Amino acid sequence: MPMEKWDPFQEFLKLRNIFNELFERSFREHSLGEDVGPDYWTPPVDVYDNEDEMVIHMEIPGVNREEIDIEFSGGKLVIKGERLPTCGKGQAEYHRIERQHGPFRRIVDLPVPVKTENVQARYEHGVLTIVLPTHQKTKAKKIPINAKS
């Protein structure tokens, strides 16, 4: 029987993942907004904006497009859905479960006004991309101070 080479770096990565999971479970409802609790898991998102739109990328591989619901209300974008387990029908015995499944919900506060009539969403290769056009931001303008005559 061959011996496995021990890799301390891999052990630290495993420990980090355990702590991340504990932290997420403990503080989920406080950090992610209302209606997010132990019954939901939270997919990772990237949120950025450029001059005229806000873009959100959410990783949800294995979720059917039909299982995703996106709603905008009161300056918040609510993305919810469900990832069904890939096996476990009948008498399956799991040996390891690392991927989360079940219902998910993510609430994203939007710091700028959004043109809701032009919002677009697409889902490719397990990544949901939502593009929200924003109202033009007013650019900073330098105001000169006139000398008193």
Image: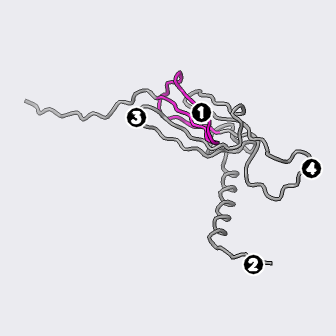
Extreme top residue here?
117
> At 88% from the left edge and 55% from the top edge, which residue is drawn?
93
Q: How far is the residue under mark 2 from the one under mark 3?
A: 56 Å
Q: Nearer the viewer, mark 2 or mark 3?
A: 2
Q: Which residues are magenta?
A: 106-133
Task: Assign a secondary structure to mark 3.
Answer: loop
Can you identify the residue that label 2 sits on?
A: 3
Crowd around label 4: few <14 · some 14–19 · many ≥20 (10 Å): few
Residue at the disc numbered 3: 51
The answer to whether mark 2 and mark 4 are in CB contact below 8 A is: no
Estimate the x, y position of residue 18 in percent, counting from the top left: 69, 60
Residue found 70% across the figure and 51% down from its top: 25
Residue behind mark 4: 91
Of the two numbered discs 2 and 3 on the same chain, state the one appearing first in sequence. Answer: 2
Q: Earlier in the sequence, mark 4 or mark 1?
A: 4
Amino acid tagged 4: Gln
* Residue closer to the observer: 118 or 28: 118
Q: Few, some or many C-alpha atoms within 10 Å of disc 1 (few <14, some 14-19, many ≥20)? A: few
Q: Are marks 2 and 3 in contact (CB under 8 Å)?
A: no
